[in-house]
Amino acid sequence: MSDRRPDPDLLLAQVRDAEARVKRGKLKVFFGANPGVGKTFAMLEEARVKRAEGMDVVVGIVETHRRVETEALLTGLEILPRRPVEYRGITLHEFDLDAALARHPAVLLVDELAHTNAPDSRHTRRWQDVEELLDAGISVYSTLNVQHLESLNDVVAQITGIQVRETVPDAVFDAADEVELADLTPDDLLRRLEQGKVYFPEQAERAREEFFRKGNLIALRELALRRVAERVDAQMRGYMREQGIREIWPAGDRLLVSIGPNPASARLIRAGHRMASRLDCEWVVVYVENPAISLSSADREALVENLRVAEELEARVATLQGRDTADEILAYAREHNVTRIIVGKPTHPRWRDKVRGSLLDKLVRGSGDVDVYVISGEVEGDVPRRPPSPSRVSPLKEYLWAALVVTLCSLAGWAAFRHFTVTDIAMIYLLGTVVVSSRSGRGPALAAVFVSIALFDFFFVPPYLTFAVSDLQFVSTFGVMLVISLVISGLTVRVREQAGFARERESRTAALYAMSRELTTARDRSQLVDVVRRQIGASFGAAVQLLLPDEAGSLAPPEGQAPTYSLDDRERGVAQWVFQRDQSAGLGTDTLPAAKALYLPLRASGHLVGVLGVMPSDPRRFQGPAQRQLLEAFADQVALALERMTLERQTQQSQVEIEAERLRTALLSSLSHDLRTPLAGITGSATSLLQDRSMRDEVRRDLLQTIVEEAQRMNRLIGNLLDMIRVETQTLVVQKEWQPLEEPIGVALIRLDDRLQGREVQVQLPPDLPLVPLDGLLIEEVLINLLENAVKYTPAGSPITISARVDNQTIVVDVADRGPGLPPGEEARIFDKFYRSVGAPPGGGVGLGLTICRGIVQAHGGRIWAENRPGGGAVFRFTLPIEGTPPTLPPREAVAETV
Amino acid sequence: MTMAVSQPLVLLIEDEPQMRRFLRAALDDGQYHLVEAATAREGLAQAASRNPDIILLDLGLPDGDGLDLTRRIREWSTRPIIVLSARGMEADKVAALDAGADDYLTKPFGVGELLARMRVALRHATLAASGKEESEFVEGDLRVDLARRQVFVRSEEVHLTPLEYRLLQTLVHHAGKVVTHRHLLKEVWGINSIGQNHYLRVYMTQLRHKLEADPTHPRLLLTEPGVGYRLKVSG
């Protein structure tokens, strides 16, 4: 019966896991305690069985070490040809990963999971090759010895005395779908050894005797068995989790491991990993960087290595900065609810603790309710191998400044000698040393102290002008001065250094903030690229290249951007790999480390939007994990900004589509109504005529007139629609001819003759109005529309005026009325499609007339707008540009008599 | 004096049955005699065999180009041809007119307009056939004495420049019918001036100013947009 519901997040992770597994290949590891127990043999046997069952099994790489029985098992199996690699003058035959991917068998045999690949291979380690094969859907059989497991590495070293360097992360082993233990009792193994059936590298001949002692074999066998049992245990717990069964109450623990740059910290990390696995809790590895201590490059490498191991063992890694390791650790522990702290046992002499304070002591005392575990390590994780050297060498200037101050004090003392007591003079010197300490480094401060004391003694302590001291109390005075100065100097130096840290931290955060601010305001891609290059380039001293995928998914620099460093095929290949695998690669990583630059995937909301390439001017800058993490933080920002731009574009497009959709709907409903209405009139009238034979003549005429009018209305509407379509689809062809404005006005007036009955239409054109380039038919349309509008919206009989004038290189035409005018605020909207004013008479058209006018006028290169007239009424004004040279007019003739 | 042909024969070449229906109703009423053809081929055959007095030709025939048909008919007949076309096909109309058609109508059109143009066309044809020229043109306030080359508006003489007069003369010659830009330019300025439409426009404006009561609201000198000009005749 389940006593607790399964944790939904865990279940989700499990489901996702299960899903991913279906597509992924399956890994079967043949595991053994020692070389020679028969792992490769077992692997080949299984392969043959599967092959016989019809499965597509291919040998990727198998080391037989010339053992006859093993080689016999290879016959009949397809063997992938190896890749020859030149390395230091010899030709190695390495596993060909690309050939394997291309061949894509169902099962591939890849021996020796822990093997290190030749330098120019894609991955540094064979287990990484296997990961890639699994991702591609190829199942893999492989072999592994217990001493190659990361977490057990040092345990095995303890047992056998041999440190094996090639390790495989436990995660890979734990994620394997099947593990088969090739087990052999130590006696059997020793017998085989005598028979010469066990392979051991020649270099380790001597070590072999050490290694194959029975005690070792037993211990190793036990280790291997235990490890496999742990795996089973984990599987069982997984099962129990799924079923909601909980045996162990989750402690909700959190573990913190404090490490330093020495390789022994690796033991601490592995111990932490073991504890965290047992407790099934989160753990974090913390390194406190002390700015007063600059690490040698060897130390730094060791530190990086330790942190890498920590990451591989799936710990969170944090780098803190501070002078006091204990304080920083405790602060972090409190902030993050750490329940247990792991540190190494101190091994330095006790006096150091007395002088500098013991880390362990401080930790324990300040730990409160946090448990502290002290694990034996070769060296405590706090003290680096070399003695600390001051990070700043105080420049000569500071010594001179110290000397100056001391001299001033002496002079002051001399001046005050007669009037003040000797104590006061001591205080003056004290003041001097304090001043020097507060501004200078340790060296000048110390120098100032000693010189002050000497001068004080010489000049102001009896017997005068000697260094002897008559009264021993002055010795204590000297002592006190010394202590005070040292304390103050120490304090100020520390404060300055802290300030330095804070500044550095702040500058990093500021850089991140600055870039993120600029990114939010970047409007287009080229701006974004610019920001990215500038900011990241400045913060990291590197050339930055953004690579974005095109539709086909291949990466390229954004259009119009020249690459900041040379992007040869190799670099592009690396970037492409990063994009496909969603994993960093290149400089400073394990994958393709020979590349010129580091490539980071740009991840936003779960999918990749591109790759960021960073080529530092100083390759060593990327060794530190803090730099990497900062760079990743930058990369995240860039990815988000890119995604934001894409989304913005999509939103705009959506809005455009929505608007288009809206118009289409409006058009359809409008059309439907406006076409059907006149048709209704026509149908009605015509059918009435047909039906009623005894209709009176006037009635008949009336109906027939209706039919004619409605038909004309429809004609007009259809014309409008066609014009609208031409304007919208930009197929409006404007054929300009030089014409006097009178012509189109005249035509428009004639066309509307009937409707203008009863109105006074004034045409006011200046007599010297030049010819205007315009399309006669189209401008007639404009005038007709404007005049019709005037007729529709003004009371019958009110006057309409058409006028024109020349303004600069344009002609301005007005069509004005004395009607009610335009509703205020609507002057621009009336030109919108389908806009009908509130006071529109029924049957007043579909609202396209003015839109068409605008389209035509704009196609001529002019403008059209409407205003209310002073004195009442509206005026519609449009301009037409007078461009080009007017044609030569026909030669003026003499006005001769016609006769 | 030559009598107008009584019951002139009208050949209608039109493929749309609805159009034919209403034209039949309009024309086949005692005043005219109507013959119909629905395709270009049929139309050509009928034109040749029946020798109609006037031909109404739709430019949008399914099996042939109305323009082509106009040319072919013009090869052996001087009978008036009126072309029917939709709005927006001005270029086709101009081409047909230049190829020899006499006038045009834009669909949709009213029967009144059709009959008016037919009358004008037939009158010109009769006049031309009789060989006689009219020596005077009167319309509204305008009187043109072609023999003496004098122009009167409301009985007052108006002085025109030679080119203006030539322009007016050409229009009078075709009074009531549309005259294309091309034709006018050729007649007035000569064949090299074809295409200089602005000449025409300027001169027409001048004429309007001299002859019309309200030049901006012309009653006599009408613009046919995209095609040419027409001197209006009543009746």
Image (spheres, rainbow, N blue to C red):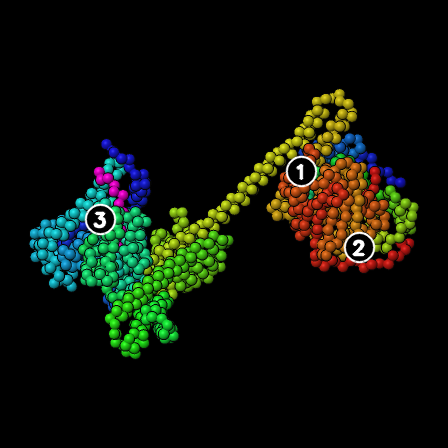
Give amino acid for label 2: Asp
Q: What stretch is highlighted in magenta?
A: A247-258
Residue B181 position in % (x across, y down)? 76, 50
Q: Are marks 1 and 3 on the same chain?
A: yes
Give me the chain letter of mark 2: A
The residue at the far front in this view is A419
Q: Which of the two discs, 2 and 3, sits closer to the camera?
A: 3
**Circles 1, 2 touching at the beta carbon (< 8 Å):** no
Out of B69 and A77, give the one closest to the viewer: A77
Using the image, tell me which numbered label, if any, was put on residue A837: 1
Q: How far apart are marks 2 and 3 (CA)?
A: 102 Å
Disc 3 crowd rating (10 Å Cα; few below 14, some 14-19, many 20+) is some
Q: Name the residue under label 3.
A: A275
Give amino acid for label 1: Ser
Q: Residue at x 47, y 55 (%)?
A: A518
Classify the position of the N terminus of chain A by image quarter.
top left
Instruction: State whether residue A620 appears in this view.
Output: no
Q: Earlier in the sequence, mark 1 or mark 3?
A: 3
Out of A423 and A734, give the one closest to the viewer: A423
Vertical comparison of B51 with A477: above or below = above
Q: Which of the two discs, 1 and 3, sits closer to the camera?
A: 3
Q: Which of the two discs, 1 and 2, sits closer to the camera?
A: 1
Using the image, tell me which numbered label, if any, was put on residue A728: none
Q: Distance between the residues labelled 1 and 2?
A: 38 Å
Q: Is mark 1 on a helix, strand or loop?
A: loop
Give amino acid for label 3: Met
Q: Which residue is drawn at 81% across and 53% down?
A: A767
Disc 2 crowd rating (10 Å Cα; few below 14, some 14-19, many 20+) is few
Residue A848 shown left or right of residue A23 in the figure:
right
Q: Which of marks 1 and 2 is nearer the N terminus?
A: 2
Q: What element carries label 3?
A: helix
